[in-house]
Image (cartoon, helix red, strand yellow):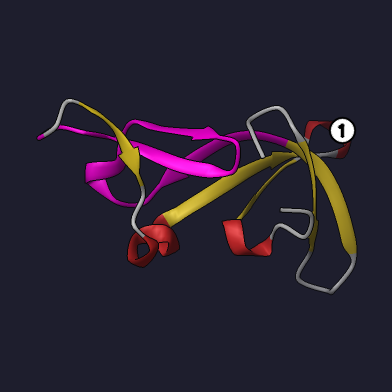
Amino acid sequence: MNIGDEISYEDDFGRRKSGVLSAIGSDKDSYDDLKLENGIFFYKSKKLGKYVPVKDKSMESIYIEVTGFASRKEYILPTEVLNY
């Protein structure tokens, strides 16, 4: 899974939807520089000066922006992606 890939997910009503993974983000201040490569989320470590994988315990702070029909944007958690 990378930015630009088409993904599937269920909406709040249990309907299967799909769209393009258009961006990722986090509600943690320390994760202001994120990237996604082959399904692995990385953040830029200020201490190490390089990208390191996001820890499992911090995955709850990561969200995915999905662009769907008519350029509508929705925000989901990585665990909500069905074809991951």
In the displayed structure, 1 sits above or below 71; it is below
Judged left or right of residue 35, residue 80 is: right
In the displayed structure, 11 sits above or below 42; it is below
Disc 1 crowd, CA 10 A, few/some/many (<14, 14-19, 20+):
few
Q: Return the x and y of residue 33 as percentages of the image width and height.
A: 33, 31
The residue that disc 1 covers is 70
Is disc 1 placed on a helix, strand or loop? helix
Kind of residue at disc 1 = Ala
Residue 6: quadrant of the picture: top right
Q: In this view of the protein, which residue sits in the foreground, 70 or 61?
A: 61
Q: Residue at x 42, y 59 (%)?
A: 59
Q: Return the x and y of residue 29 as percentages of the image width and height.
A: 24, 45
Residue 12: quadrant of the picture: bottom right
Judged left or right of residue 83, residue 61 is: left
Judged left or right of residue 53, residue 18 is: right
Q: In this view of the protein, which residue sits in the foreground, 50 or 33?
A: 50
Magenta segment includes 23: yes
Q: Return the x and y of residue 76 as percentages of the image width and height.
A: 62, 56
Q: Give the farthest residue toward the bottom.
A: 13
Magenta range is: 21-47
Q: Residue at x 85, y 73 (%)?
A: 14
